[in-house]
C-alpha cells in the first residue's frame, strides 16, 4: 500500500468511531414500513368514498333512463290553485254601487224615495229593503219620474239578495214597479225596453267610466251604432217593436267590447194590477 492509502483508511476509521451506532437498526426500518402502509390504506379509503358517491349519483339517472314504471315524486306536492279571473272594474259592485246620475231626486217629492222602498218590501213580502238610486229621469210624454234602483232585499226566511228595478211615480195607487229582477253577477249593464209614444225605447245604465253603449238591430255587426248618451254610462235608443235577436253591447274607453247581451222585450205599457214584471212575486 501506498502512504496515501494508509492515510485514507486511518481517516475513515476515525470517522466511524466518532458516530454513535443505532441501538436497534431494524426499528427504524419497521416504522418507515408502517408509515407507507398507512398512506396506502388512506388513499384506498378515499378512492372507495369517491366510487360510492359516483354510484349514488349514477343509479337514479340510470333508473330514470331505464325504468318503465310510473314516476313517483319524492314527496307529495299540492296542486296549483287556479287563478280566479279578475273582476271587471266596470261591473256593478252592490257594496260600492255606481254613482247616481240623472234628474234631481228632489223631483220625486218629499218622502217618495222612502215610499218606493217601503212599497217594494210590502208588495213582495220582504222583511226589509235598502234601496240605492242609480239613475232617474222625468219621461216628458208622461211627466212621470222613472227611477233605476238597486235593492238589498232580505226575505222573511232571512235570506238576503240583491235586485234591481225601475219604478214610476207619481201614480194614484203609489209607485208602480215597471221591472224588478235579480241582479246578475257580474252586472255590466242594467237595460230595459220601456214603452214610448211610437214604440219601445231601450234604456241602459252602466258604469260612468265605460267608453259607450251600442245597439245592434237583429244582431247585425254592420248595423252596430252608438246609443244616445244621456249621462256618462247612461244611453238610450228607439227600438220600435224590438226583436229577440237585437243586441246590446258595452265598450271600455279604448273601444274594446266588455259586454254583450240580448235586448230585453219591450215592457207592456199597462201592467195588470198587482202583476208587475218581477221575480219577487210571492
Image: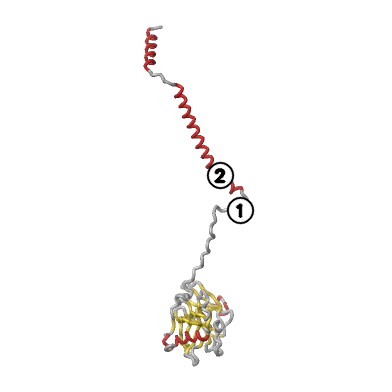
Residue 65 coordinates in the image, percent (x, y): 59, 48
Residue 280 coordinates in the image, percent (x, y): 54, 82
Q: Residues under labels 2 and 1: Cα distance?
A: 20 Å
Q: Residue at x 41, y 6 (%)?
A: 1
Residue 248 coordinates in the image, percent (x, y): 53, 78
Please determine whether, in this image, residue 42 is positioned above or below residue 9. below
Compare residues 243 and 142 and report the one nearer the observer. 142
Specify whether residue 211 is in view.
Answer: no
The reply to whether dot 2 and dot 1 touch (C-beta < 8 Å) is no
Q: Which mark, residue 58? A: 2
Residue 15 coordinates in the image, percent (x, y): 37, 15
Say which quarter of the image contains residue 216: bottom right
**Disc 1 target residue:** 70
Q: Residues within 10 Å of mark 2 (few under 14, many from 20)?
A: few
Compare residues 281 and 102 and report the one nearer the observer. 281
Q: Residue at x 57, y 77 (%)?
A: 219
Residue at disc 1, secondary structure: loop
Check the image and name the residue furthest to the top: 1
Q: Which mark, residue 116? A: none
Residue at disc 2, secondary structure: helix
Q: Image quadrant for the C terminus?
A: bottom right
Specify whether residue 90 is in view.
Answer: yes
How many marks the image carries: the answer is 2
Q: Which of disc 1 and disc 2 is earlier in sequence? A: 2
Check the image and name the residue furthest to the front: 23
Amino acid at each position: 500500500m501506498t502512504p496515501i492509502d494508509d492515510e485514507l483508511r486511518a481517516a475513515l476509521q476515525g470517522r466511524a468511531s466518532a458516530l454513535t451506532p443505532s441501538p436497534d437498526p431494524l426499528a427504524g426500518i419497521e416504522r418507515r414500513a408502517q408509515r407507507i402502509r398507512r398512506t396506502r390504506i388512506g388513499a384506498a379509503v378515499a378512492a372507495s368514498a369517491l366510487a360510492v358517491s359516483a354510484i349514488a349519483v349514477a343509479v337514479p339517472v340510470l333508473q330514470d333512463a331505464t325504468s318503465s314504471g310510473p314516476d313517483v315524486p319524492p314527496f307529495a306536492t299540492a296542486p296549483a290553485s287556479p287563478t280566479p279571473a279578475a273582476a271587471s272594474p266596470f261591473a256593478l259592485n252592490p257594496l260600492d254601487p255606481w254613482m247616481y246620475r240623472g234628474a234631481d231626486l228632489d223631483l220625486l217629492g218629499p218622502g217618495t224615495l222612502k215610499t218606493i222602498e217601503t212599497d217594494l218590501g210590502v208588495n213582495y213580502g220582504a222583511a226589509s229593503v235598502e234601496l240605492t238610486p242609480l239613475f232617474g229621469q222625468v219621461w216628458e210624454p208622461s211627466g212621470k219620474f222613472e227611477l233605476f234602483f238597486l235593492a238589498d232585499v232580505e226575505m222573511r226566511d232571512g235570506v238576503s239578495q240583491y235586485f234591481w228595478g225601475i219604478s214610476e211615480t207619481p201614480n194614484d195607487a203609489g209607485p208602480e214597479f215597471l221591472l224588478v229582477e235579480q241582479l246578475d253577477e257580474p252586472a255590466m249593464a242594467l237595460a230595459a225596453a220601456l214603452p214610448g209614444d211610437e214604440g219601445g225605447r231601450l234604456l241602459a245604465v252602466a258604469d260612468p267610466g265605460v267608453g259607450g253603449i251600442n245597439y245592434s238591430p237583429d244582431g247585425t255587426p254592420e248595423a252596430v251604432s252608438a246609443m244616445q248618451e244621456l249621462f256618462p254610462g247612461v244611453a238610450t235608443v228607439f227600438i220600435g217593436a224590438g226583436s229577440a235577436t237585437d243586441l246590446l253591447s258595452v265598450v271600455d274607453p279604448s273601444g274594446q267590447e266588455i259586454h254583450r247581451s240580448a235586448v230585453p222585450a219591450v215592457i207592456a205599457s199597462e201592467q195588470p194590477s198587482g202583476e208587475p214584471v218581477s221575480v219577487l212575486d210571492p
